Image (cartoon, grey):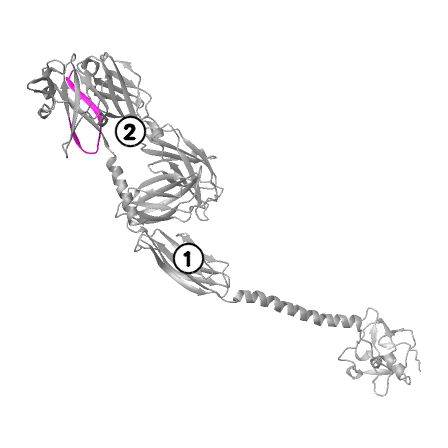
Amino acid sequence: MSSRGSLCVLICVFCFCCALKRKDVQELTVTGEDLKDCGKQEKVCVTSSDDCLAASDVLAATPESFVNMSCHFLEDAESFTCRWIQLSDVRTESDFIFRRADEVYCPSILNYFSHFNLIIKSKSVVSQKEQFSEVYPVIIKEIVQAPRPVITSVNVTDSSVNVTWNGGKIQVTKCRIRYKHLNTESWTETADFPASDESLFVIEGLQAFSEYRLSVSCFHGNSRWSDWSDETRVKTSESPPSASLSLSYHLASDGNSGVRQLLLLWKALDVTDARGLVRGYEVSYMPTKQPSLKKTFNTTELKAVVRVTAEEYEVTVWANNSAGRSPHRRLRVDASRSQDVRSVKGLWVYSDGSSLRIRWERDFSAVNVSEFAIEWSAETNPIRKHWQRVDGSTFTTRLTGIEPDEIYTISVYPVYDSLCGPPTSISADLQHGALLDLVRFRLVNLTQSSLAVQWTWKEAKPRVNVLQYRLVLEGAHGNESLSVSPDKQQHSFDQLHANAKYSIYIQGETTTGNFSKASLDVNTPLIDYDEMMRFAVPVILLLLVFGIFSVSSRTVFREYFFPIVANPRYSLIGRWLLNPHLKGNGKICVLKLESSFQFDQQEKNFIQVERRVSLISEHQEVIPSKISTTGEGTTLWKPNSDALAPSSLPEYVDLPLLADDSDYVQTGHISSVAQTSD
């Protein structure tokens, strides 16, 4: 838009504003003592002597400047009052001009039987410009108004107010009362009721321990209703609370001892339900199977922590005020069952003027949260706790009443009807916001397609009030950003590009701008170690399996398709076939038994003598025959690797070759031997 166009717009706006006339409600009250005569003008009375000069003139009326005028006369005070709306763009002063057709005595013109014409004159305070209303005919007896009542006393109960008032010197015939709750804008009016000598009325159906404003108006004969009396503030008395508490609980394990901590959390009653000032709460709990172990205690807090064992408990809570206690709220808690109830995540706080603003993450999807309970207290006065409840769809709220030099501990509890989660806490003050600082920002893992960073939160007073911290990743292929909070200490970025440069930094946001808290520059590798190992290990295993298969398959294939053929040179039969000119050796070596055993009694042993004919060649030695026992006796000699030569035995004898029969040996001598020869 050009400068000329802007100037035209400003001029139009200025002209429009100047054309608007200000609407002011004007009211002027006069008595007979305020009226003055105008000398020779005996039919005129004025409130200012300066108006007498214009009284005989023809006045130019501007009725559009005087709107919604009404007048009334108070008989007991002999006062005349008019109200109207003045349409003017400047401040004005107003006067009355009274005219009658006959002569008038000005101090007595205001009486019950009087009548006259009224003109209102307004004069600009700045320009002294005068404006006159049109002529209003006035008949006093038609505008008489009952006197304004004065409330003299009120008596209250928990649901009613007894009002007494004074109606003035004139006897009124009927009255009415209006009242409203202190926190509402609309009034409630009673029906008209006849006035009594006591001027007394009782307002029923009020809320206990509630503050009201009320006023009275009365009527006399054919007069007008009086103005409302001055407002009187009253407060009904207390009554026992009408509603039970909203109670929820959380179970936390206390190590391996079997003892658990039961957190009880309840909501303060609304004013309409509390019906008074709640002075404390009564809590009782007992094992359902052991009622004799019932315990009861009182507290002024909105939470309590008790130690229980792994069994079922019955918990009851009441609210108390000076008039009594509320209906009980009872829960059955199975302390043997664990609870998987999440706490809020992403809790952060910063200063916002004279208050603290807290917020937490929105993605709270474990269960439906009915509301959040916020608890905060100053470190110098931890006993005095403040509570606030917000709806389950709300994820931010403002904490008011914060002292400038105090450090506050703030906790947020998620509430799910009768269950609640563990608290998430943070410390803050009005100057710095959250008393946490982010340090030790570092890279913990880097691959071809991902990286991971880590940081640490430290309790400290930061230099500035940080609205939030954000983790930012910048690269040639795009940017990523996310909010970080004290419950988050590391993050991984995936789907990155290989052999690419990235910048990672923590950014703090303030009301005046952003600043970089810590930063890192990294390059992703072209091929990372894990990828190499994923490729190399299968290849090595494949080669190893292929080698084993090749070696084993060669042996197997050779055995099935290329079997080993026996060499005749190493076979006795083969040798005999190749060299048939062999000679049999008819000698056998026999162990002489007398040299090895001494027999005290007659024993019989069966000896089988096996004739073994050796087929020897010129280069072969004769293998001795084998002798063994076949009865109950002991083996006399067995050939082995160390006793192939006959010389290893004590003594041998040469016997003729026996036939294929056997005989018994007695006392170490062979009874008969059949000799055969080649």
Residue 25 location, quadrant: top left
Vertical position of residue 434 compared to residue 58: above or below: below
Q: What is the C-alpha distance between the residues marked 2 and 1?
A: 52 Å
Q: Is residue 269 left or right of residue 200?
A: right
Q: Which residue is mark 1?
A: 472
SS category of the residue bearing label 1: strand
SS category of the residue bearing label 2: loop
Q: Is residue 584 left or right of residue 93?
A: right
Neighbourhood count class around disc 2 (C-alpha, 10 Å): few under 14, some 14–19, many 20 upward: some
Mark before the other along the chain sequence, 2 or 1: 2
| Residue 433 location (% of width, % of height) | 31, 50
Image quadrant where one finds the C terminus: bottom right
Q: Residue at x 65, y 69 (%)?
A: 544
Foreground: disc 2 or disc 1 = 1
Vertical position of residue 404 compared to residue 130: above or below: below
Residue 646 location, quadrant: bottom right
Q: Which residue is mark 2?
A: 182
Inspect the image, locate mark 2, and give the three-letter code of the amino acid beneath it: Leu
Q: Residue at x 64, y 70 (%)?
A: 543
Q: In front: 349, or 231?
A: 231
Q: In front: 613, or 186?
A: 186
Report the span colored magenta.
Answer: 76-94
- Circles 2 and 1, Cβ within 8 Å, touching? The answer is no
